[in-house]
Image: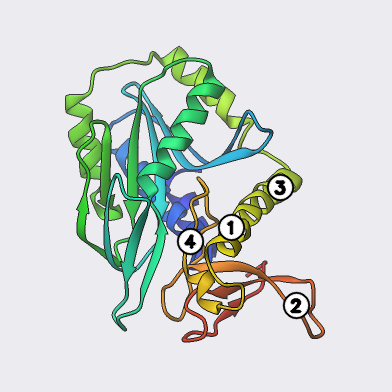
Amino acid sequence: MGVLGDIFGALLADNSGTYGEALTAIELNWVKLFGKKGITLKNIYIPKEDGGTSEIDLLFITPKGIFVIESKNYSGWIFGDEYSQYWTQSLPNKQKNRFYNPVKQNRTHIKWLRNYLGEDVFCYSLIVFSVRCELKNVTVKSDYLSVIKRDDLVSEIGYLWKHLDDSLSDEQMEQIHQKMLVLTNVDEAVKQSHIDDINCKFYAKTEKELPVQSETALEITPDPENTPERICPRCGAPMILRTAKKGDNAGKQFYGCSAFPKCRCILNLDE
């Protein structure tokens, strides 16, 4: 759709991971406007060997290889390193939230991407955070990995462009594009199955690790390779998919703030 299409998409998106992905796609379009050839794809559901899927936020297919982008639309201070299981978000009200290490998350994405392509194509892992956050103590040492804020994406790719060798021809780029394109046009059943699988892993882990009666059990994000990312519009904490247990809405799912009971914000699934 180009820059204008992604701007329009961002305006229509909610204050969640979808919104952050739309803004990141805009930055990738600016990369292309500065003369760097690439094909952008969003929300790619890669099949796994167990029958599930691994959702990649964005792919940028270029002559330099594939930039695999994990978008995090978080606010506050961010702390973490590439080897720890969890990273920490610290909000201005001194509330702290843990979320699964996005470096590990994206490594799993790349694993299944290469498995699907059937070749060891060069991939560069980019973890892109919102401009609303500060990366206070984030350390990464591995090659072919960057953790940056969204407003640094254009300059980061520009720098990498000068230091990475070409590895894909135009024909190879288009072949990969066509293979990936079909994985963006999945039906709602595939998307719901993906969410259900994550939700199942989430509750299995929290019930095993923490007391069932503790509401704070939902403040710890487990380690599935993908966690549906919605951000609380009130306090900036991650939103958690929950199911009402009583009342007129018993059995229905909704998004509740992970900071409950300090924050009681809820969102309907279609919000």
Q: Amino acid at mark 2?
A: Lys
- Contact, mark 4 vs mark 1 (Cβ under 8 Å): yes
Q: CA distance from mark 1 to mark 2?
A: 17 Å
Label 3 to label 2: alpha-carbon separation: 22 Å
* Amino acid identity at mark 3: Ser
Residue that label 3 marks: 193
Q: Would residue 188 appear left or right of 149 to someone viewing this image?
A: right
Residue at position x 49%, y 84% in the image: 263
Q: Are marks 3 and 2 in contact (CB under 8 Å)?
A: no
Of residues 185 and 201, the one drawn nearer to the viewer in this rendering: 201
Crowd tier of the residue under label 4, counting other residues whose Cα lies within 10 Å: few below 14, some 14–19, many 20 or above? many
Tell how many labels: 4
Is 147 rendered above or below residue 92?
A: above
> Which residue is label 1 attached to?
202
Please, what secondary structure does the residue beneath circle 4 have?
loop
Q: Residues within 10 Å of mark 2 (few under 14, many from 20)?
A: few
| Callout 1–callout 3 Cβ contact below 8 Å | no
Q: Earlier in the sequence, mark 3 or mark 2?
A: 3
Work out whether mark 4 precedes mark 2 in sequence or the reverse, and give the earlier one: 4
Please state the horizontal and vertical placement of residue 74, each as a whole percent of the image: 38, 64
Q: Separation of disc 3 and disc 4 at Cα? A: 19 Å
What's the mark number on residue 245? 2
Which of marks 1 and 4 precedes in the sequence? 1
Q: Secondary structure at mark 1?
A: helix
Q: Is residue 228 left or right of residue 33?
A: right
> What amino acid type should be assigned to the residue bearing mark 4?
Thr
Instruction: State the image coordinates of residue 6 (x, y, percent, origin top left).
Output: 47, 51
- The correct choice, above or below, for 198 with respect to 104 in the image is below
Which residue position holds label 4? 221
Q: State which quadrant residue 29 falls in.
A: top left
Q: Is residue 194 above or below residue 271?
A: above
> Between marks 4 and 2, how big is the CA–CA gap?
21 Å
